[in-house]
Image (cartoon, rainbow, N blue to C red):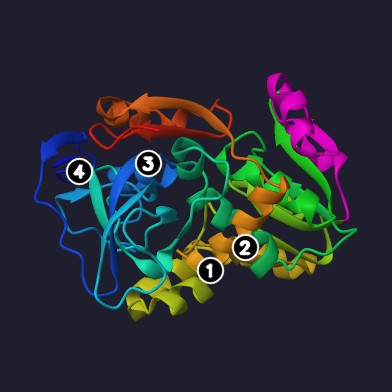
Amino acid sequence: MKAIVLPSYASSLLAEDVPEPVPGPRDVLIDVHAAGLNQLDEKLRAGEFKQIVPLKLPTILGHDVAGIVAAVGSEVRAFAPGDRVYGRVRDGRIGTFAQRIAADENDLAPVPAGLTMHEAASLPLVALTAWQALVVRARVQPGQKVLIHAGAGGVGSIAIQLATHLGATVATTASAANAEFVSSLGADTVIDYRADDFEQQLSGYDVVLDSVGGENLMKSLRTLRPGGVAVGIAGPPDPAFARRLGLSPVLRAGIAALSSSVRRTARRLGVEYSFLWMSASGEQLRQISALVESGAIRPIVDRVIPFEEIPEAVARLGEGGGRGKTVAAIAGAGGD
């Protein structure tokens, strides 16, 4: 079958013929119709997380999938051949940039009614990130004030909709060209990050979802009320994350050092910093699907590209500027 392969860290992605996946007893074999592209794909290609999430190279990249079940393992009960499914496959088993993939049934959910495969493939990683940040980690409540950075991007565009559904007052950062767009998603306040300093305009926030990191994160901490929480998805990783991954003492010490300045600033301000590395969850996807089917969340697809353009599109992910997600139509799998 055809797949997009990473031969070695920091190398170019290549289209190659690879062996067919062999599903295990709890696996679902999927004919891939569409695969979402994520910033994480480019970061893994560049080797940014090789100490935390090492890849067995060469490997197939891609985290988001939507497709049709071709076969199921002997212990699978939730799905049958012919079902329309979508999901973010778990770490250690990625590879959605291919014509077929075998995924654990617990990573998958039925495609929400009314969605195309392209729309479904745009959702899993970004929607699960928003859910785990706002619902699980920050426990956003009605009436709270939530700041979401990069509101026009993949995570931001879904997070704005989810926070609005949860009853929060939402502020976001975006370019002036995207101000009307993010407002249409539910943002109450839009800060032009190119012209204005959000730290000077916002204060007393309960929650910040930061996808930028660096000085942007430090400024975000200062917009929080005492007791508020900043959830960072761009880093730096914190000791709690290192413990959850079971990393070696040396790596845990290194991660603690990376985040020491942020954590020290958070303690001084009386706020909390929490690093989020999202995880696959078919159960959470089912809850997200219900919000999609009710109209509370709509997928945002910036563009659909052919299979052959995946390497170039992944390389451009770091440039930003798009709205929502880029999705690849997988050749030979039926397209939409």
Q: Is residue 172 left or right of residue 43?
A: right
Neighbour tally class for label 2: few under 14, some 14-19, many 20 plus, Cα within 10 Å:
few
Q: Quadrant of the C terminus?
A: top left
Disc nearer the start of the sequence (3/2): 3
> Which of the marked residues, 3 or 1, is nearer the chain's N terminus?
3
Q: Secondary structure at mark 3?
A: strand
Q: Position of residue 189 (x, y in %)?
A: 84, 37
Q: Which mark is residue 6?
A: 4
Q: Mark on residue 92?
A: none
Residue 35's mark?
Answer: 3
Residue 106 in percent (x, y) is at: 41, 70
Q: Nearer the viewer, residue 223 or 112?
A: 112
Please give the range of residues in magenta: 176-204
Residue 154 part of the magenta-drawn span: no
Amino acid type indicated by mark 2: Gln
Q: Secondary structure at mark 4?
A: strand
